[in-house]
Image (cartoon, rainbow, N blue to C red):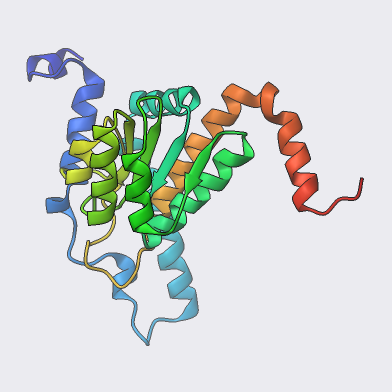
Amino acid sequence: IRFAKRVGFSGYTELRMALAKEVFSSEALPEETPIAKITDQTTTDELMHLVVNSTCQSLEGIEKVLDTKSLESAVEAILASRHILISGVGASGIVASDLQQKLARLGLHASYTADSDMQIVQACAAQDQDVLVAISYSGETNSVLKAAREAKKSGATIIAITRIGGNSLSKVSDLPLHVVNSESLFREGATLSRFGQLMVVDLIYTMVLARRQQKVSDLLKRSWEAVSHVSG
């Protein structure tokens, strides 16, 4: 702690976050991830080992780059909100849909549409009691950025789920929730990055559930019975 303060940080936590940003920044990202090295000669056992280990390493890295105070503040903002808008396209849209259905099961007014134009329209109609969760691994997706900027003009709180390092979405957000910079922005498809974003969604869901457990236990049971077609 003394060393951290001597080199200009407020404490150990701030130093740790700065080091994590340095390690996981886009400049430090290797040209190829282990998954990118798979060829037609890769055996099934080798492929399984590569995918499982790469995923585990990426998820473990979240503890180094995700600021717990920002996560707690994001959960508090979600719980205090009138309406939760969620923006994301492509692979991030899958993550957005997962977040929407999880929050809806907890009785929260959360909405997501796959129509990127409608995401922007909803952001324009947001109010200062609302929250927009903007999801983009690159942090540069045009439609997600536009939705975030319009929601900010409307006075809504902006939560971003995006990669560590400087990007436009982090800058426009009030509460950035970072994932490991595990993949090149130019890639065959989102794999590790999607797992990281889903992990953040699961953390949000679990924290909301912990704070509302007494209120939502009956709702969870009722919704489970309803969608499981349990008679009664």
Is residue 229 visible in the rendered structure shown here?
Answer: yes
In the shown orientation, is residue 31 left or right of residue 150?
left
Q: Is residue 119 above or below residue 200?
A: below
Q: Identify which residue, 150 or 171, lies in the foreground.
A: 150
Q: Nearer the viewer, residue 52 or 169?
A: 169
Left/right placement of residue 95 relative to residue 229 reads left
Q: x%, y% of residue 212? A: 61, 24
Is 70 positioned to the left or the right of 109 in the image?
left
Left or right of 211, for residue 217? right
Q: Quadrant of the N terminus?
A: top left
Q: Residue furthest left?
A: 7
Residue 59, above or below 157: below
Q: Please say if 157 is above or below 163.
A: above
Provide residue 136's location: percent of width, then percent of height: 31, 51
For the point 45% across and 81% down, the residue is 43
Picture residue at 40% right of the left edge, 49% below the top: 197
Question: From this viewpoint, is residue 61 visible?
Answer: no
**Residue under the image location 45 percent in, 53 percent down:** 95
Direction right: furthest residue: 232
